[in-house]
Image (cartoon, rainbow, N blue to C red):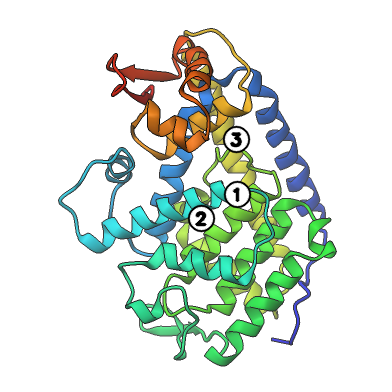
Amino acid sequence: MLAGYHPSFQRSALLVRNLAEASSLRAWVQQQLIDVSWVGPTQRDALIRLAHYSTRIEGNPLTLPEVEALAAGKDLPVEERAKREVLNYFAALRWIWRSGPKVIQEADVLKLHRLLTQSILPADEVGTYKTKPNAVFAGDQIIYRPPSPGLCPEFTRDLLKWLNSSDSLIEHPVIAAAIAHHRFVSIHPFTDGNGRASRCLESWILFRREFDTHHIFALDEFFELDRKRYDREIQAARDRDNELTSWLEYVSEGVIVTLRKTQQRIQALRAKGTGPRITLNGTQERILQILTQSPAMKGSDLAHALKISRALFSRAMRPLLEAGLVVKEGSTKAAVYRLKG
């Protein structure tokens, strides 16, 4: 690997077609925002599926219903590390989704790793670069030897420099996100958690480049459902001296498959809707996002999180209750709000 980073790929006919279809599907989703009965459940589903399938790629044994139960705030009698991996992934996604369209810096990447691995790795390996060589195995066989520990900080900074450059910013968000995913997992800068961090970074870029603004699709499900192909596609690009055309074709295919599933889910949820159609304002959208990330919250806590008065909160909440998007439990100041299941 050379100093500096300049990704190598071709804009093949297949890649161009995939990006066009992905953009068309994303535009369809954006056009549905006038009917928002699907927003909360779809966001919650994406959060759960991202956490489940990304950790499952790394061997987490929890089932999708168990991950869903953890998202609802339930405690489960399961192996502690498995539970912690999922809860950490929730925390990392929530942090990413709160971060806004900011430039991703080295400190952000280290914090992302810290959120993903806290209480799992030894304290001196959480949010810090590796200090010993590591390798990628298939069974007992080494299939990839990442860069040495001394090179990882430089290579990570080079990737971020490219990611924040004008060359990257003019690329399609799917291209930029897929490149970052492959390059980061190939740098393999941490003792453990490199795969999860790479996939989280990809989700982050799709969010900050406004391709998945509403956090409604879970690309990691596509990767996990054919794990052998996922591993094969990563390694195939490495074997071609990191020429990424086939990898970009693969990821863009995954975006199409995932967005089609999201489209079908939106259509099904809309068909079940019984409340009036409303157009969300910014405060109402933020309420749904917060409730997606928390199983239930008091009105006072929601108002505090939104930094608005209780009166403004009540006015914003009323249409959500009338549309059946949110359920209020209790009638006093201690009442709690949750998304309608």
Q: Residue at x 45, y 29 (%)?
A: 41
Q: Secondary structure at mark 1?
A: helix
Please tell me in which quadrant of the rendered image residue 296 appears: top left
Tell me where residue 284 sits by quadrant.
top right
Q: Is residue 231 above or below residue 203?
A: below
Percent from the top left, x then y, of residue 30? 68, 29
**257 or 202, which lies in front?**
202
Disc with the residue nearer the chain's start (1 vs 3)? 1
User: Can residue 268 be seen from the camera position used here?
Assistant: no
Q: Are marks 1 and 2 in contact (CB under 8 Å)?
A: yes
Q: Quadrant of the C terminus?
A: top left
Q: Hey, which residue is sitting farthest left in the picture? A: 77
Q: Amino acid at mark 3?
A: Arg
Question: Callout 2: few (<14), some (14-19), or many (20+) C-alpha neighbours within 10 Å?
Answer: many
Is residue 162 shown left or right of residue 50? right
- The tag earlier along the polypeptide, 1 or 2, is 2
Judging by the rendered image, the residue that carries numbered circle 2 is: 223
Q: Disc 3 marks which residue?
A: 260
Q: Which residue is at a point 29% across and 48% down the rendered structure image?
A: 63
Question: Which quarter of the rendering shows the N terminus?
Answer: bottom right
Q: Quick one: label 3, few (<14), some, or many (20+) residues within 10 Å?
A: some
Q: Residue 233's spot in the image, x, y percent? A: 59, 66
Does the rendering let one see residue 129?
Answer: yes
Query: Alpha carbon of mark 1 to alpha carbon of mark 3: how far?
Result: 10 Å
Q: CA distance from mark 2 to mark 3?
A: 15 Å
Nearer the observer, 297 or 32: 297
Residue named by callout 1 = 254
Secondary structure of the residue carrying tag 3 is helix
Density class for disc 1 (Cα within 10 Å; few <14, some 14-19, many ≥20) is many
- Which kind of residue does numbered mark 1 sit on? Gly
Residue depicted at x 74% and y 35% = 24
